Amino acid sequence: MTDQRLLHGQWSSRLAFILAASGSAIGLGNIWKFPYLLGENGGGAFVLVYLACVVGIGLPIMMAETMLGRRGRQSPINTMAALAEEAGVHRAWRYVGWLGVAAGFLILSYYSVIAGWSMAYIFKMGGGFLNNVTPQMAQQTFQDIKAAPDVQLVWHTAFMAATVLIVSKGVSQGLERVARLMMPGLFLMLLALDIYAAGTSGFSQGMSFLFKPEFSKLTGESLLVAMGQAFFSLGLGMGSIMVYGSYLPDHVSIGRSSIFVATADTLVALMAGVAIFPVVFSNQLAPGMGPGLIFESLPLAFGHMPGGSLFGTLFFILVFFAAITSAIALIEPAVAWLSENRSLSRVRASIYAGFACWFLGLGTLISFSHGASVTWFGKTLFELVDFITADLMLPAGGILIAVFAGWIVKKQESAQELELGSYFCYWRILIRYVAPLSVFIIFAHAMGLL
Ligand code: PFF
């Protein structure tokens, strides 16, 4: 085990870790998923519950997960096994790592399909096909892509291939470089979109939809969805931040880095909301239209602003980068485990894991067209995989991580790792009681038990 820990790569600096962790957090979850979920779940009240989940559940779990990773310095499965052994508790704790690897696979399988849509939009925008579009044309363009599994297959394949290529290059070479470029660019582009949105006729309606809570619109399921989205967006509960933490040098403050990453992630999601909803209301689109929301609304903004096709192309390129830095995090736990335990080279491990995700993704891909009528519990395959992973597996993984970090890791050890000073006691209350209980209550409420 000691050898393994020594061989394990490390980030070159604190900035490198922050960039990579934000790269994992900021992705399609912020730009594509958060807006459409809040559109489907009634707006302001959803945003409020989401924010409460980020602060009360997500942030403490992010610190816990990073801490466990740095203590274990291996893939999540081996880290959990090693830490359980060290603490003298049951070996079954390593299944937390397995749960994460499985969730990562399943999420990446559909994530890649959606990322493929944004790649297709790079070319739609760049080719000027969306200049001066009407809402009907924008909707038609998206429906055409959704109805063409062959086109989606090309992009899904291209996205997985790009992910495998970057992951196979290893920790600092591949992962750091991509993250460093993308983040500032994405931020600036969203700022430009927000400024544009502020000048549209639907701005005030968009703002009150986003920020005026109407609690009557919240159901048990939408509470669950808001919590699941907090896990998804911060990239928690599946060991990917654990694996990033495992590459973290000892002197970096986990507390401060986590606060930075969670704030950046939340800001980007809110900025995406501010960019999208005014455009939705200005063009009489339906906020609850589902996964097509950004693809049908943003082209309307770009299509009517000066230099729009250039900005639009750049925007979707940035979305692609945001997606790929998250995809890397989703596959990393599996790749780390394959290369540690099956003595595969990183290149081989990445190819095997990537191929498996690609294959699983074919199911999601079909579920948007020919397979749309095949449903389980009223959900298409995409919706089902999304629900099981984001709303069940990630929060379940999160509870287990919280319990392990709060109840099993010794108090002095976590105090030393986190360096939160006098705030440590708040973290401990959140991680021991607030986070596990809230997840549990939201689960129970959604199942109709409360
Ligand atoms: N946080 C990413 C997003 O918002 O798009 C998705 C994600 C990455 C989820 C890494 C889970 C994860 F471990």
Image: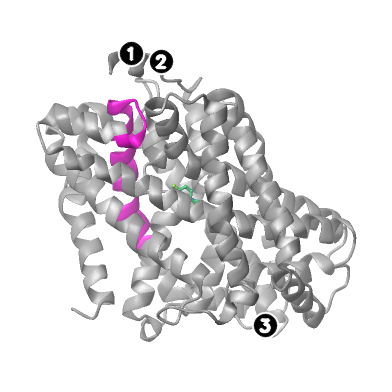
Where is residue 50 drawn, in percent x and y?
Answer: 40, 64
Q: Main secondary structure of the magenta part?
A: helix
Query: What's under tag 1, amino acid-wise?
Result: Asp
Q: Quadrant of the N terminus?
A: top left
Label at residue 3: 1
Residue at the location (64% across, 72% down)? 292
Q: Which mark is residue 30?
A: none
Direction left: furthest residue: 88
Task: Name the residue rendered at 43%, 56% in the picture.
Answer: 232
- Return the disc, 1 or 3, that comes first in the chain's sequence: 1
- 139 above or below 119? below
Front-lying residue, 317 or 6: 6
- Which image quadrant is residue 126 in? bottom right
Residue 59 visible somewhere in the drawing: no
Q: Secondary structure at mark 3?
A: loop
Q: Quadrant of residue 279?
A: bottom right
Q: Is mark 1 within 8 Å of ligand 1?
A: no
Q: In 3D space, how far apart are the residues under numbered discs 2 and 1 (Cα atoms)? A: 6 Å
Q: Nearer the viewer, mark 2 or mark 3?
A: 2
Q: Which portion, as a residue range, is magenta?
A: 51-77
In the image, which is nearer the foreground, mark 1 or mark 3?
1
**CA separation, marks 1 and 3?**
58 Å
Q: Give how far across and how far down residue 162 sits, in percent.
A: 67, 40
Query: Circle 2 is placed at which residue position?
Result: 7
**Toward which corner of the image does residue 181 lie, by quadrant?**
top right
Q: Kindly indicate whether the residue at mark 3 contacts the one at mark 1 (C-beta within 8 angstroms).
A: no
* Image mark for residue 285: 3
